Image (spheres, coloured by chain):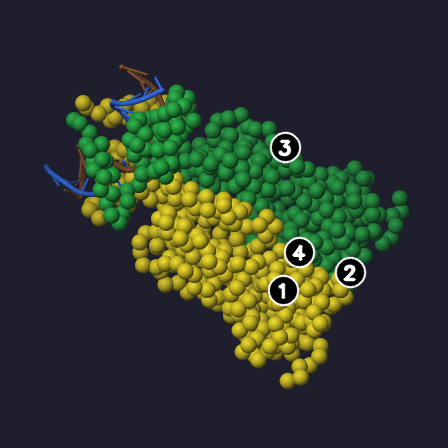
Chain colours: A yellow, B green, C brown, D blue
Amino acid sequence: MPSSGPARREASRATDAPGHRRRVTIGDVADRAGVSKSLVSFVFNDRPGVSVATRERILQAAKDLGWQPSARARALSRNKTQAVGLVIRREPELLSTDPFFPQFLAGVETGLAQHDYALVLQVVGDPATERAAYERFARESRVDGVFLTDVRVADDRHQLVASLGLSSVVVAPTSASPDTDSAVVGMDDTTGVRRAVHHLYALGHRRIGHVMGAAGYVHTEARKQAWTNTLDELGIRDRAIATADFTGGSGTRATHELLDLPRPPSAIIYGNDLMAIAGISAATDRGIRVPEDLSVVGFDDIPLAPYIVPPLTTIRQDVVAWGAAAAETLVAAVEGRERPALSLPPVDFVVRGSTGRARSQPKH
Amino acid sequence: MPSSGPARREASRATDAPGHRRRVTIGDVADRAGVSKSLVSFVFNDRPGVSVATRERILQAAKDLGWQPSARARALSRNKTQAVGLVIRREPELLSTDPFFPQFLAGVETGLAQHDYALVLQVVGDPATERAAYERFARESRVDGVFLTDVRVADDRHQLVASLGLSSVVVAPTSASPDTDSAVVGMDDTTGVRRAVHHLYALGHRRIGHVMGAAGYVHTEARKQAWTNTLDELGIRDRAIATADFTGGSGTRATHELLDLPRPPSAIIYGNDLMAIAGISAATDRGIRVPEDLSVVGFDDIPLAPYIVPPLTTIRQDVVAWGAAAAETLVAAVEGRERPALSLPPVDFVVRGSTGRARSQPKH
DNA sequence: GTGAAAGCGCTAACAG
DNA sequence: CTGTTAGCGCTTTCAC
C-alpha cells in the first residue's frame, strides 16, 4: 500500500490552488532543501548531527518559504505547549487600579520572550472559576506551567497544581514561606515598610498607624508584620491598625476609624496607594491637613502618586523585574532545568510631600 | 499488518506503570464505553447521530476517567486552536495607569469563557516587536484570530493581519471608520466629550480648552474632533488646545502651556484622568484653584477619580462590556458565523467636584 | 550524516 | 446509528 501522500503534495504544490494557499509544512522545506523531514527538524531543534552545509541549505529553504514550525504540531508530538498560564483573580474595582497586574505582565512577557514561550491568560472573579481555570489549563493541555500570584494564607492552589501535574512558580513576599515544593520568587515587602516606619520615626512620629489591605493575602500579612516588628524594635507599643481591602472606599472608612481613636495616629502607612489617596481625601474632609497634621505613606508608587496634592510618599517595588524573574524561573522549571539564580532589585522608598515633621515633638 | 495499538494499550492500562501514569486518551474512553473513538468525538463535538443511550454511556465513561479532549490534538486535526491573541503595546508608564487595558481584558475573558476560547497575550513596547508578535501568532499557528486595539491613524496592522490570514476584530471609536474589512466593535468617544462641553457651557464657561492624548491614535483624534465640533455647534470660536501623550508629565506641561496663553481657558477637558489629575496639581502649584478658577474634566473614570481633591468630573465608558462584545465578535468571525448584534451601554458623564461655575458670567 | 517510519491524540470522511 | 481509516505537522527512535 504505497502512500499517496508525496504524490498529492507534489500536485497541490504545483497548482497552488488559487484563493486558498496551503500551509507550508516541514515537508515542503525538506523537499526544497533536498533532505528528509528529520533533518529539518534537527536543525530547528538545535540538535547535533547535521553538517554545516546541509544546515545552511535547510535554513535557507525555510527562509525562502517563510516557514516556522507549527506550535500546534510541535505541542502534540513533544507533549509540551511551550506556553505557560497565568490566572488572575481580582475584584472588579481593583482590576483597573492595581498597578501590580499590568507591570507584572509586562515583566513576564520579557522573561518569556527570550525563551519563545507564549502566555495564556485568564482573568477570573471568584475562587470556583479560579480553580476551574487551572483545571482546564491542565486537562486541555493548554500550558506547561503556571504562575501562582496573589497567594493567600493557607492557599489550596499549591496542592491543586501539584495534583494536576503542572509545573509552577510561586510569586509571593520573601518573608512568607508558603507551604509548597515549587520554586518561590519572592519580593521584599518588608524592607520598604521598615524604612517607612523609620522615616516617620525620624520625623518625630510616635503614633504610626497602619491600614491593612485585604485579609488573607500573604503580602497583606507581610506588610502588617513588618510594621509591627519595626515598631517593636523602636520600642513603640502603640498599635493603631484598621483592616481594609485595598479599595478606595475601604481606605476612607479605615482612615476615619483611625482618626476617631481617642489618641489618633499622627502618621499612617497604607497597604497601597489607592487607600492612601482615599485617606488623604478623608482627612482633608475632616479638616485635617496632610502632611501638617497627618503624614501619609502609600505602597506601590503608582504613576499618579507624584501628581496628587500633596505628592504621595510611598514604597516602590520593581514589579516588572519581579515578573521577568518569575518567568525565567517558571520556564526553567518547565524544562527541568536548575532554577536560575536571579537577584531582584531592592525596594525603593520614595519620599514626597505627604509626610512631614510631627507637630508635637516626641517626649523621648 | 495488524495494528499493535490495542494490545499495547490494554497492557499499559492494566499495569498502570507506577510513578508516571499515562495520559487518558479518547481511546480509553471509547474502550470503557465499548464504542469507537469517533463516537466519543461526536459526543464531545455536539454532533448528531449518537443515540441518547450511547451518549450517556460515553459521557459517563469520560467522567469516570476524568477525560477531556486535549486542546493540542484537537488544534492539530481541526486546524483551529480555539484561542485568540491580544497584542498590547504600551509605554511603560502608561502600562500601570491606563485603566483600559485591565478592564478590557476582563471583558474579553467573560466573552471568551462562554465559548471556551483561551486568550494568548503578548505585551510589547515597540512597533517592530508588535509586528513580530502578530507574525509569530500566525506562523506558529498559536491563535485563530486577534484583537486590534489602540488603533492608529493609517494603521498598517489591518493589512498585516489580513496578509497573515488571521481573523480579526478592530476595537476603536465608532466615529472613526478604519480602512478595513474586518468587524469593528466601536465605542462612543464622542458623546462623552460632547456632554462635557455642554456641561461646562451651562456653567458659564466660554473658553474651554483641550489637552489631547498621544497623537496618531484614532481615539485621540475622535476626542479632539468631538470637542471641536461641539464648540462649533455652540458658536464658540476659541480653540485652546495642547498636545500631550497621556502621561502625567505631559499633562503638567500641557496645562502650563494653556494657562500661559494670553487668554487662558477657564475649563479644560483632558484626554485621560491621569493628565487631568496632573493638570489639577499643576494649576494648584500656580495658585489657581480648582474648580473656583479652573474647571477640569478627565476621561476614563479611574477608581481613584472620586478620591482626589477635588473629586474628578470625568467621562466613563464601559470598557468591560466593550471587551466582552469584542470577544463575542471575534469568536463569531473565527468560526465564520454572522457577527452578533451587540449593543454597548452608553457612555456616562460623571459630575464631581472638579468642575464649577465660571467666575465671570458669560457676556452672551 | 541522513532517511524511513512510527507515533502524539484527535477529527472527519466514508462505509457499513 | 456505528466502526474504519486516513490524516493534521512535527518529533524521534532506529537503521543505513
Report which residue position mark 3 lands on: B343
Question: How far apart are labels 2 and 1 at the CA level?
Answer: 36 Å
Q: Is residue A173 visible?
A: yes
- Pointer 1 local density, CA inside 10 Å: few below 14, some 14–19, many at least 20: some
Q: Is residue A165 above or below residue B27?
A: below
Q: Position of residue A348 (x, y in %)?
A: 53, 67
- Which structural element holds mark 4? helix
**Between marks 2 and 4 in the image, the one whose residue lies nearer the viewer:** 4
- Which structural element holds mark 1? strand
- Which structural element holds mark 3? loop
**Callout 2 and callout 1 share a chain:** no
Q: Residue at x 83, y 51 (%)?
A: B357
Quadrant where the C terminus of chain A sits is bottom right
**Between marks 1 and 4 in the image, the one whose residue lies nearer the viewer:** 1
The disc labelled 1 sits on which kind of residue? Answer: Ala
**Callout 3 and callout 2 share a chain:** yes
Q: Toward the viewer: A41 or B347?
A: B347
